[in-house]
């Protein structure tokens, strides 16, 4: 599991990690938030609240959480459609990572930190988040980081993308 506050680069890190290593399978999360301008339509399964809630009721999520008025969740991996023999990678909120750790203590949680709060803010603004969301994500980061530091198996500061990906590769290799 790769977790961390918004704007630390989780999506970029995980994309590069999975591109480099075909033994990894990225679980595509669901969300009820609107797709950002320029965001890949396949970044999430974008859905409405009623559909998401029906999936929750049917037990179709490994984990799910509500954040800033939207739902986010990871579907239970379907090991019959290509995940067999591959490590499942979840790019998820800290709430969800804690849920997975409770159900699967053997899961490895890597918590990613920004090099600075200023850099985190720059990244959030650079992806087009409105001011209200940027401020809410920065405030949530102040709350999440101490918890993430406590519950994570590994802490990684994303200062340089290629170094960070290399560090995650080493963590995965060591965990195997």
Image (cartoon, rainbow, N blue to C red):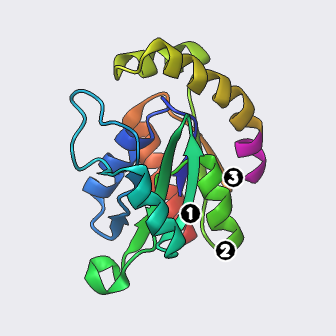
Residue at horizontal 50 percent and vertical 33 percent from the top: 158
Q: What span is in magenta? A: 147-151
The image quadrant of residue 160 is top left
Q: Which residue lies under the disc numbered 3?
A: 152
- Mark closer to the chain start, 1 or 2: 1
Closer to the camera, 10 or 57? 57
Spot occupied by residue 59 in the image (x, y as percentages of width and height): 52, 75
Residue for badge 1: 63
Residue 150 magenta-drawn? Answer: yes
Q: Residue at x 71, y 26 (%)?
A: 142
Task: Give the secondary structure at mark 2.
Answer: helix
What residue is drawn where x is 74% and y is 53%? 151
Where is residue 46? Give x, y as percent: 31, 49
Crowd class of label 1 (few under 14; some 14 to 19; many from 20; radius 10 Å):
many
Q: CA distance from mark 1 to mark 3?
A: 17 Å
Name the main secondary structure of what is drawn in magenta: helix
Q: Which residue is mark 2?
A: 103
C-alpha span from label 3 to label 2: 15 Å
| Disc 2: CA contacts within 10 A as few (<14), some (14-19) or many (>=20) | few
Q: Secondary structure at mark 3?
A: loop
* Residue 105 visible from this viewpoint: no
Q: Earlier in the sequence, mark 3 or mark 2?
A: 2
Q: Is residue 74 above or below residue 39?
A: below
- The secondary structure type at the circle numbered 1 is strand
Q: Viewer-proximal residue, 141 or 24?
A: 141
Q: Nearer the viewer, residue 101 or 173?
A: 101
């Amino acid at each position: 599991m790769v977790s961390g506050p918004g704007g630390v680069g989780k999506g970029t890190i995980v994309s590069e990690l999975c591109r480099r290593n075909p033994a990894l399978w990225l679980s595509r999360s669901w969300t009820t938030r609107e797709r950002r301008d320029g965001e890949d339509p396949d970044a999430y399964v974008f859905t409405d609240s009623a559909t998401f809630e029906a999936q929750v009721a049917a037990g179709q999520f490994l984990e799910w959480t509500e954040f800033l008025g939207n739902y986010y969740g990871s579907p239970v991996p379907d090991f019959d459609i290509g995940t067999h023999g591959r490590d499942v990678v979840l790019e998820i909120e800290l709430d969800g990572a804690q849920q997975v750790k409770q159900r699967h203590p053997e899961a490895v949680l890597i918590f990613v930190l920004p090099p600075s709060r200023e850099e985190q803010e720059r990244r959030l603004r650079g992806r087009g988040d409105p001011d209200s969301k940027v401020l809410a994500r920065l405030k949530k980061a102040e709350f999440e980081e101490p918890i993430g530091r406590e519950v994570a198996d590994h802490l990684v500061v994303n200062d340089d993308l290629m170094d960070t990906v290399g560090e995650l590769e080493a963590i995965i290799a060591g965990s195997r």
